[in-house]
Amino acid sequence: MKKITFIKSIIATLLIASSTFTAKADEGMWLIHLMAQTNYEAMKAKGVELSAEEIYSETTPSLKDAIVALDFGSCTGSMISKNGLMITNHHCAYDDIQKLSSLEHDYLKNGFWSKNQSEEIRIPGKTVMFLDRVIDVTDEYREVLKNFEKDDGSIPYTSRRANSVIEKKYAKKGFEASCAAMLRGNKYYLFYYKVYEDVRLVAAPPTCFGAFGKDTDNWSWPQHKGDFAMYRVYGDKDGNPAKYSPNNQPITPKYVLPVSTAGIKEGDYAMVLGYPGSTARYTPSFGISEKINITNPAMIKVRDTKLAILREAMNADEKINIQYASKYFMNSNYWKYAIGECEYTKKYDVVGIKTAEEAKLTAWINADPTRKAKYGNLIEELRACYAFAAPYMATGIYHREAIVNGADLTRLAMRFKGFESTMEKQGCCVLHKDCAQCKNLRHFCEQYFKDYDEQVDRKIFTAMIELYVKNIDPKFFPEEIGNLVKKFKGDYQKLTDYVYKNSILTTKDRLFTWLDKGVDKKTIDKDPAYLITKSAQTKNYELRDYLKDNSQKIGTLRTLYMEALVEMNKGTVLPPDANSTMRITYGTVGGYSPKDGVIYDYRSSIDGYKEKYVENDPEFDLNPDCWAAIQKGDWGRYADKDGKLYTGFATNLDITGGNSGSPVINAKGELIGLAYDGNWESMAGDLYYNPKYNKCVCVDIRFILWILDKYARASNLLNEISIVE
């Protein structure tokens, strides 16, 4: 998202701890501002040498001041120089690198290394966010919520309008305030951020380092990726956030992480500070069953088809490979995760575990008349609501995956609903070519058509429309699409040919010629691509309306469910779900045994490149200069005591999406690596944390330094970084 107006509330049981409370030390992405009360003693027992105030402070520089959120939480980064240099994952920068790439300047294939600040490339729209402080606004928020009482007398546990009231009241010049609900209404906090908008790409390794192994190695261990990239953050002359200007200067962060080359060993203390996106570990058993048996399989089915088309086209044409690299990654990353999530949620019997917990909760409720009066037949009501929605959940997924996120054509057509709405409000049939919407569309399409190939898109459209037609519930199937299918007698290729021949959206020249004349409603209404998209969207709205009351009831029941869990577990600090606010997780470096007779070491080395390298393979090939640097074997001061260059390591840190790029920090507060992935056995992690198998996969900072030094010869960047032995 581009503006912080609302951060999703977490569904969690987090109580402010006292000395009598207990905490599960290894599981959880803990709120950083409560760390001193909830987790610090457990962290000390694990080996941390820093004081709580050295990790988080609102009055003096601390570790938290070096940690940033990219694009309001899509990834995490950390500051590693006094000149505003920031490090994150290569896959976090992947979309930026792809958009800058072309056949003439293929930064994905060859990497990008700025030799001085004048060569750094501005990334329009990129943001970097620093957390300043957090305040408790629980009592005031609850009072504001009373103004939003529903017709049935209930009060929602959160509201965008309530957020706005609190954020406006506590607005502070130079900061963006964001209100977040915790425990579905048990606590409310206001977060103050400094948001920088002038961010420039500094360095990125070639993809053969940054994404070595691609889909095959993704979500697995051992991995060998040099998954890093660097940006620089700029502000005005006083170091404050400012719009882009060539006169802006690199900021001086409050705190900079020192970088350690001392290496690691098994059992070493490690921690991550970052911005994990979302987990749902307090989902009822019925919701988990719905995800692994209905919604995930539907999504996987659509993306299987789309990714196969993209792979074939990308492997056959280098230009298409560049154009679709980011789109492929965005589709494949969660596709593979969802496959693993289904596999391991079933393997660990998470539904069974949740069912047992719900039985315990029900018995606790029934054991006391007051609790019975308050919570009633909570679990049975949840069961009934999920059962009502189950027949229609796949329909929503097929709409999202095949239409909203399907072919580029339907994704572009989605934007025209706004034009039609504007015309209706203004009572006109034509919008002038200089209207704001027309200008915005033209700007959007400049980049859109750079990364668009009509023949590829035709193949995707044909496959997506067929999947949509064959899988949508008949009750919510659009008549207009049905008529087109009948017109072409079920021949989806002919239907595609008709749409691409007659739509103004399929070529840049055709669309821009139309925009130059002004946007008219008549053309929009008869455009076949828009007709398909609009009719599908209309039916999806009908589906939402049909499920609205049931969905609201599920929300109310889940709030009550969470309240019951809080009450039943009173006296215990339970780990909160992630919600894009800064968190800390801590543990140790170590390997694991996924099954009988198989033991994974805690480290991976450069030898993995030699073992996996396959010439001309799209996943395991290496650029000649990358392969030559590895073959040379000059590891310099980045080698371990045994003479090897280690590329990655595994820890038991609890992370999820949004933690990508998070710094992995040792007991002394030094940067030892970057978190970038989970192992295959942790794929149930957003729903259930398995302490035996959940691992955080990290790139060793020494491998990153070796790439900078021995491969890229980027001495200008190395000289900025504070390296400690």
Image (cartoon, rainbow, N blue to C red):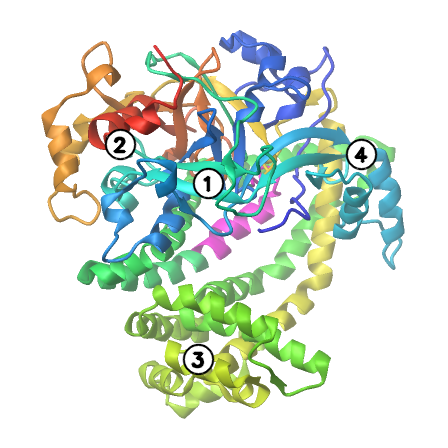
Hey, what amino acid is under mark 4? Answer: Val
User: Could one spot residue 545 in this view of the protein?
Assistant: yes
Q: Which residue is mark 3?
A: 511
Which residue: 66% across, 77% down? 422
Name the residue tied to disc 2.
224
The amino acid at mark 2 is: His
Earlier residue among tags 3 and 2: 2
The residue that appears at 19% across and 30% down in the rendered structure is: 608
Q: Which mark identifies residue 345? A: 1
Mark 4 = which residue? 137
- Local secondary structure at mark 1: helix
Residue 478's image quarter?
Answer: bottom right
**Tag in front: 2 or 1:** 2
Q: Cβ–Cβ below 8 Å for labels 2 and 4?
A: no
Image quadrant in which you'd find residue 269: top left
Magenta part of the protein: which range? 278-297
Please tell me whether mark 1 or mark 3 is closer to you in this view. 3
**Vertical side of 725 occupied by 233: above or below:** below
Residue neighbourhood size for the residue with mark 2, other residues' Cα within 10 Å, grouped as few (<14), some (14–19), many (≥20): many
N-term mark: 4 or 1 = 4
User: Judging from the image, what secondary structure is the residue with disc 2 in?
Assistant: loop
State which mark lies toward you, 4 or 1: 4
SS class, disc 3: helix
- Counting residues from the start of the chain, the first of labels 1 and 3 encountered is 1
User: Mark 3 to mark 2: distance in Å?
Assistant: 44 Å
Q: Give x and y (percent) for residue 452.
A: 34, 67
Percent position of residue 492, x then y: 35, 81
Residue 596 seen by the camera:
no
